[in-house]
Image (tube, grey):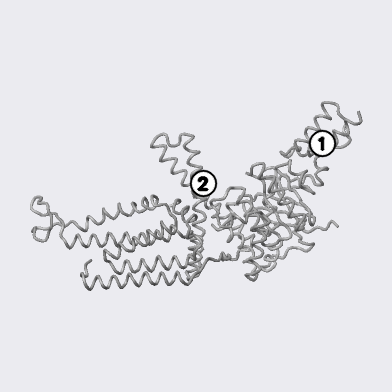
């Protein structure tokens, strides 16, 4: 049941200064999956996300939400932005209130829900993101990782169907990265939220993502499952990306040292299985 | 300023209804200004200091340091009121004869100076009570409830939030400049500071743009509506506030009646 919840169809976007940020993008975000958009700096990921959230209107082409073209009227936008949440890279440009609680409540209040319902939603979002104990603290006293969680909670409180995150792991320490990704995975599995992340942290992709799109200069150069993508190492390298470390190791073992593995591997557990099998066969 | 903010968040009175604290501070401030009497001002000073230090748990040393700031200004200001120049020596308690004039202090001037000094100190104590025990967020919610214009409250809240971001950015840039010897000489220091300020302005402008985008993504329609947190509310505290102020007013009237208006 791979239903597309969000689609970009032949999408073009040109900025007012003539910069062509997107050149005919086609993306299908599947319902309940984690989709990664990989791309170097300036590949057009952020522009794409702003188009997904209708902050920017495509110059050409369409955004489809649940197979229907986006309605750019006032009410249409409101419904769309409730359904599609956008978490920005820098939490400092997303958190506008000095109070954690107030910031998280902003989205649901804008949806004009009854107060009791808002309270429940805010509470749930705070708990889900593990920041209930931060509610009393002022935003400026939080660490970067905590701010990131508050930013995610602010979106989660609106109960969207799709959450789009721009570089969710940038600037976090290894533990913070793991925690945020685990949180996203939980949101996907337990709440059925479809997740789109832009990242250049390639090692995360095989661990957490179901689908991958590789972008370069406003175009999609590769698409598929992580496994399929990482078979095309040369294309990845040509767009300033690389293989996951483990996949790179496996590639070197095969090419330089004459190993002959049955399959490729991009994560530690995959590599472990393949190496074990290989050794058993000897 | 940052310290005041920090103490406000760790105050023991933090959870008390901000409305109540605002009422207490402003009413007492009003009475203190109206009374303009030394004993009343001192009473207000003592009440507010006790409330801040004992109830709010602000460290006394820090409070004293904060108090020293207005005291310095006050002493300078009050001296100019107390000291007068005149040709005759009659009205002065003490005077110096310089050239053909007397410079000295008269009793009335001394009293006026003392009244102003304590009046100001008492008022400052009222405001310190408010700012040391009420986090900005709570104060803003009180202002909102008092039907302060939305635009002003929203501006205040945004300014408050982004002062910290701005300062952090400025600090990082300052360190980066210093590490590249940007402030090694006076002339390069001026140049570096100029560059820092202009870059800071551009950054702030860009940041505001990003903020607008992110607010829009969350359904912003021109108003920053948020949910207010609830605070402990008690009718008894309002009674106490009224009691203290009635006591102060009666005290003032008695003093004016029996001792004389100027004290």
Provide residue A240's location: percent of width, then percent of height.
Answer: 71, 38
**Residue bearing mark 1:** A271
Question: Closest to the observer: A74 or B127?
Answer: B127
**Residue at the (47%, 68%) spot, across then down:** B19
**Residue bearing mark 2:** B169
SS at circle 1: helix
Q: Chain of mark 2?
A: B
Q: Assess disc 1: are there few (<14), some (14-19) or many (≥20) residues with their C-alpha within 10 Å of its C-alpha.
A: some
Q: Based on the displayed image, in which of its 4 quarters is residue A238 positioned?
A: top right
Question: Closest to the observer: B2 or A22?
Answer: B2
Distance between the alpha carbons at the discs numbered 1 and 2 = 44 Å
Instruction: Give the number of marks.
Output: 2
Q: Where is the C terminus of chain B found, in terms of image quarters?
A: bottom left
The answer to whether marks 1 and 2 mark residues whose Cβ atoms lie closer than 8 Å is no
Would residue B188 appear left or right of A4 to someone viewing this image? left
Viewer-nearest of labels 1 and 2? 1
Residue B79 visible here: yes
**Residue at the (24%, 57%) spot, across then down:** B78
Question: Closest to the observer: A69 or A201?
Answer: A201
Q: Chain of mark 1?
A: A
């Amino acid at each position: 049941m791979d239903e597309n919840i969000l689609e970009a169809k032949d999408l073009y976007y040109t900025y007012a200064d003539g910069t062509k940020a997107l050149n005919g993008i086609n993306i299908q975000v599947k319902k309940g999956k984690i989709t990664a958009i990989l791309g170097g700096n300036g590949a057009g990921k952020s522009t794409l996300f702003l188009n997904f959230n209708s902050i920017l209107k495509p110059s050409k082409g369409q955004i489809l939400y649940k197979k229907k073209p986006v309605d750019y009227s006032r009410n249409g936008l409101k419904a769309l932005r409730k359904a599609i949440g956008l978490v920005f890279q820098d939490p400092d440009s997303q958190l506008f209130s000095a109070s954690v609680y107030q910031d998280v409540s902003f989205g649901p209040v804008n949806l004009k829900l009854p107060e009791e319902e808002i309270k429940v939603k805010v509470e749930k979002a705070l708990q889900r993101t593990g920041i209930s104990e931060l509610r009393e603290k002022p935003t400026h006293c939080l660490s970067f990782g905590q701010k990131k969680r508050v930013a995610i909670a602010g979106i989660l409180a609106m109960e969207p169907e799709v959450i789009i995150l721009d570089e969710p792991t940038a600037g976090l320490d290894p533990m913070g990265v793991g925690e945020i990704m685990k949180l996203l995975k939980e949101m996907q599995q337990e709440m059925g939220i479809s997740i789109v992340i832009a990242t250049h942290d390639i090692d995360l992709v095989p661990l957490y993502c179901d689908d991958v799109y590789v972008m370069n200069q406003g175009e999609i150069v590769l698409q598929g499952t992580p496994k399929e993508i990482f078979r095309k190492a040369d294309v990845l390298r040509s767009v300033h990306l690389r293989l996951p470390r483990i996949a790179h190791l496996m590639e070197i073992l095969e090419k330089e040292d004459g190993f002959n593995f049955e399959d490729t591997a991009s994560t530690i557990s995959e590599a472990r299985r393949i190496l074990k099998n290989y050794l058993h066969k000897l | 300023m940052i310290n005041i903010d920090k103490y406000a968040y760790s105050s023991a009175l933090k959870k008390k209804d901000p409305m109540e604290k605002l009422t207490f501070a402003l009413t007492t401030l009003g009475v203190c200004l109206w009374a303009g009497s030394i004993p009343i001002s001192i009473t207000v000073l003592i009440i507010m200091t006790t409330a801040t230090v004992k109830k709010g748990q602000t460290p006394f040393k820090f409070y004293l340091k904060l108090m020293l700031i207005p005291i310095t200004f006050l002493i300078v200001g009050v001296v100019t009121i107390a000291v007068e120049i005149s040709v005759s020596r009659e009205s002065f308690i003490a005077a110096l004869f310089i050239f053909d004039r007397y410079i000295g202090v008269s009793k009335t001037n001394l009293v006026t100076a003392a009244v102003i000094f304590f009046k100001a100190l008492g008022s400052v104590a009222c405001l310190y009570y408010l700012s040391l025990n009420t986090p900005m967020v709570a104060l803003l919610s009180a202002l909102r409830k008092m039907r302060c214009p939305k635009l002003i409250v929203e501006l205040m809240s945004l300014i408050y939030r982004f002062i910290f971001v701005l300062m952090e950015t400025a600090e990082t840039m300052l360190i980066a400049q210093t590490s590249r010897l940007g402030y090694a000489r006076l002339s390069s220091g001026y140049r570096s500071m100029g560059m820092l300020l202009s870059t800071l302005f551009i950054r702030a402008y860009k940041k505001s743009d990003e903020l607008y985008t992110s607010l829009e993504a969350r359904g912003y329609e021109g108003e920053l509506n948020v949910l207010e947190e609830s605070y402990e509310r008690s009718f008894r505290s309002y009674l106490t506030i009224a009691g203290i102020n009635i006591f102060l007013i009666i005290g003032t009237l008695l003093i004016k009646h029996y001792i004389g208006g100027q004290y």
